[in-house]
């Protein structure tokens, strides 16, 4: 049996679906943070993908219907930077995104190479800077925006 199969893209239908996925990923993040010394790279990746779903929930809430989902990480960054109200979210998202890129490819966007993820960021900094600062600030900012009650 082959493990390869076609994947059809199916956009999540609403804000709740994105928040549920973000929270599911956040719960896993809390679990693997116990093992950050061994899996700092995975902690960074899971934090980023949880953040991505919080960001997608924002887009679903505030963007016109044709732009409710980012189709790439670059597009998400552009959409976040395009609206002043997303400024805080954009800053924290960028740090999470960069850490996830380095965790996956051991290279940053400028071509700087790393032998291991911890050459880029120690496990302590993953917890203190990436999770306790950037991830939680992004989550708080998204929650504040989503509860603001204003669409545009």
Image (cartoon, rainbow, N blue to C red):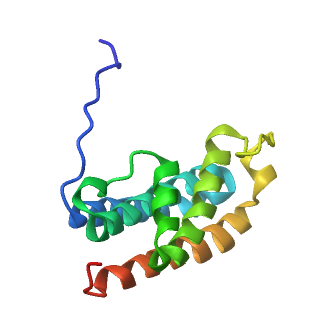
Rendered location of residue 115, percent (x, y): 80, 39
Q: Residue at x 25, y 86 (%)?
A: 149
Place of residue 68 in the rendered image (x, y in percent of width and height, measured from the top left): 29, 58
Q: Residue at x 52, y 66 (%)?
A: 81
Where does the image place residue 132, in percent across and percent down from the top left?
A: 59, 76
Q: Residue reaching furthest left?
A: 13
Residue at (76, 52) in percent of width and height: 118
Against 98, residue 93 (above or below) is: below
Instruction: From the top left corner, tell me how far across and down residue 148 is, in percent.
Output: 31, 87
71 over 121 or under it: above or below: above
Q: Is residue 54 visible?
A: yes
Q: Quadrant of the C terminus?
A: bottom left
Look at 34% across and 64% down and name the residue there: 59
Left-right relation of 20 to 105:
left
Name which quarter of the figure residue 20 lies in. Answer: bottom left
In this rendered view, identify the residue nearer to me: 28 or 87: 87
Depth check: give the residue in front, 32 or 57: 57
- Give the position of the N terminus as an image quadrant: top left
> Farthest top residue?
1
Q: How many marks?
A: 0
Residue 2 in the figure: left or right of residue 26 = left
Asked whether residue 31 appears in the rendered view, the answer is no
Residue 140 placement: quadrant: bottom left
């Amino acid at each position: 049996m082959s493990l390869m199969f076609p994947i059809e893209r199916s956009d999540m239908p609403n804000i709740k679906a994105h928040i549920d996925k973000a929270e599911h990923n956040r719960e896993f993040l809390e679990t693997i943070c116990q093992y950050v010394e061994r899996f700092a790279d995975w902690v960074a990746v899971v934090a980023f993908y949880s953040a991505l779903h919080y960001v997608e929930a924002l887009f679903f809430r505030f963007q016109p219907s044709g732009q409710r989902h980012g189709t790439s990480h670059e597009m998400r960054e552009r959409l976040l930077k395009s609206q002043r109200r997303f400024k805080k979210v954009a800053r924290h998202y960028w740090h999470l995104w960069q850490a996830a890129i380095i965790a996956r490819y051991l290279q940053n966007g400028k071509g700087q190479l790393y032998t291991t993820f911890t050459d880029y960021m120690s496990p302590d900094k993953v917890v203190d800077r990436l999770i306790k600062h950037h991830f939680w600030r992004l989550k708080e900012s998204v929650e504040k925006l989503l509860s603001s009650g204003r669409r545009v």
